[in-house]
Amino acid sequence: MLIIGTVNYFLGEWIGKAKDGRKRFLWIGIVFNVFTLLIFKYSDFYIPELIVFLAHIGVETGSGGIQLLMPIGLSFTTVQLISYLVDVHNRILLPEKGWLKFILYVLYFPKLLSGPIERARIFLPKLDHPQPLSEESIARNFTLIVTGLIRKLLFANMLSAMIPPVAFVQPLMYSAQMLLTWLLAYAFVIYNDFAGYTSIVRGISGLLGIELTSNFNTPYFSRSFAEFWGRWHISLSNWLRDYIFFPASRALLKKIPARDHIINFILPPLVTMLVSGMWHGLSVSLLLWGSLHGAYLIVERIPTLWAPKVLLDECPKWRQAVAALFTFSLVLLAWIPFRMDLITAKRYLAGLILPSRWARPEFLWMSEVFKGHLPVGDVYGWNIPDPRIFLVLVPAILLDWAQYHHKDEFVFLKWPRWVQAALLALAILGLYLASFADSAAPFVYQGF
């Protein structure tokens, strides 16, 4: 990471100083960063072939073969460094003169593992002007940390523990209602896991006087797919918009000036979401996930070809609620290829939509539970979703609803002190009990 950071530091200097060949240095930097990411992140694709080639020429690799350990946070660092070089090239940002300050931007520990993806032009000035610690900032950052711990330990980990691992491997073993419940639980697992992580690191960084970008804004209440991507993984969404979507749109408009031309209409969102899928991982299922979201965005834009865009806030409340439910439903379906390989995803989808997969629930399990003959969670054979999942989903949704309704993630700090004290006591009790649960899990996005 020091080498990667240092190379980009000098590339930024060269791009800033060069009168001729600035674009050449920019492309050298982009290729260097992308190639480095490919070498480490996608080593599973070429290392087996390399082992075979070495065996042919008489070089034995040993029982362990060849393995590359991927530097921590490389996917997030790569896109940050590309944005730095592009901004310097476009004269939006002057190249950073201090090597140590630049390396701190690259390796700053709260954002290193899984973001947020910070722009150099926003982050670097904060190093010169850290925010002083005050009673208000302590309260806000402590709220972020506690909220993040609740999302991760009480919501994400518990929901994840209630999903049997075999459900995402052999889905046709279960009825449709079970698969739907587990898919719903997974949607809130990945959201609360990543949003919880971001909230924790934002709080930690805030206590050091450096405010990081907000990465989530109650995305499951989105009323359109464009709004969803403005609320989900915001730092990556904005990066994709500024460095993939806009450049692709401008390049196509130079060739085909008509904005409503089918190529200008389809290619930019589709390419942008395919890049998003490739950034998460080079697999057919992740490319399908990106393609689905690209298709969602394209179809959503079609009415704007013949009618002016309608502001969502001006629509009747019932239409906003229907739009939110529709958007969430399609986002939910897209999580299927995100979570599993393509073949398993096809089986999972078949298990959801085929009428024959919807089995009649057997409510005799309740009497067995009350008699003590059956654990509460052992309801799979009765075609009844685990009721504990909904006991976790309800407070998870209420937390989001409070923030969404008031348009303020710190709304709790405006409530009466006795309410704050009661909620904090409940949170500490819940986190304490969660520490004894056998539901520990790494943060999901550390895998990317």
Image (cartoon, rainbow, N blue to C red):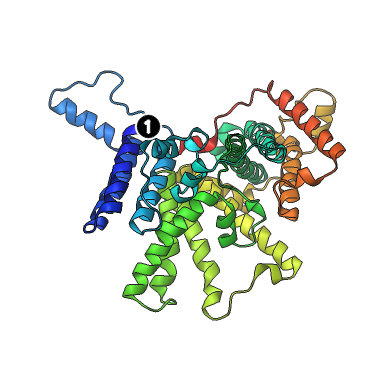
Looking at the picture, does residue 119 appear above or below residue 189? Answer: below
| Residue 258 coordinates in the image, percent (x, y) | 40, 79
Q: Residue at x 38, y 32 (%)?
A: 71
| Residue 261 coordinates in the image, percent (x, y) | 41, 76
Corner quadrant of residue 49: top left
Q: Residue at x 76, y 41 (%)?
A: 395
Q: Secondary structure at mark 1?
A: loop
In this view, the residue in front, 57 or 316, is 316
Residue 274 visible in the shown view = yes
Residue 38 visible in the shown view = no
Corner quadrant of residue 367: top right
In this view, the residue in front, 136 or 427, is 136
Which residue in the protein does label 1 denote?
70
In the image, taking residue 58 as reference, residue 402 lies left or right, namely right
| Residue 129 coordinates in the image, percent (x, y) | 53, 43
Q: Outermost residue toward the bottom?
A: 306
Q: Outermost residue toward the left?
A: 57
Amino acid, disc 1: Met
| Residue 299 coordinates in the image, percent (x, y) | 52, 68
Q: Residue at x 80, y 31 (%)?
A: 426
In the image, taking residue 126 as reference, residue 396 lies left or right, namely right
Q: Residue at x 66, y 33 (%)?
A: 149
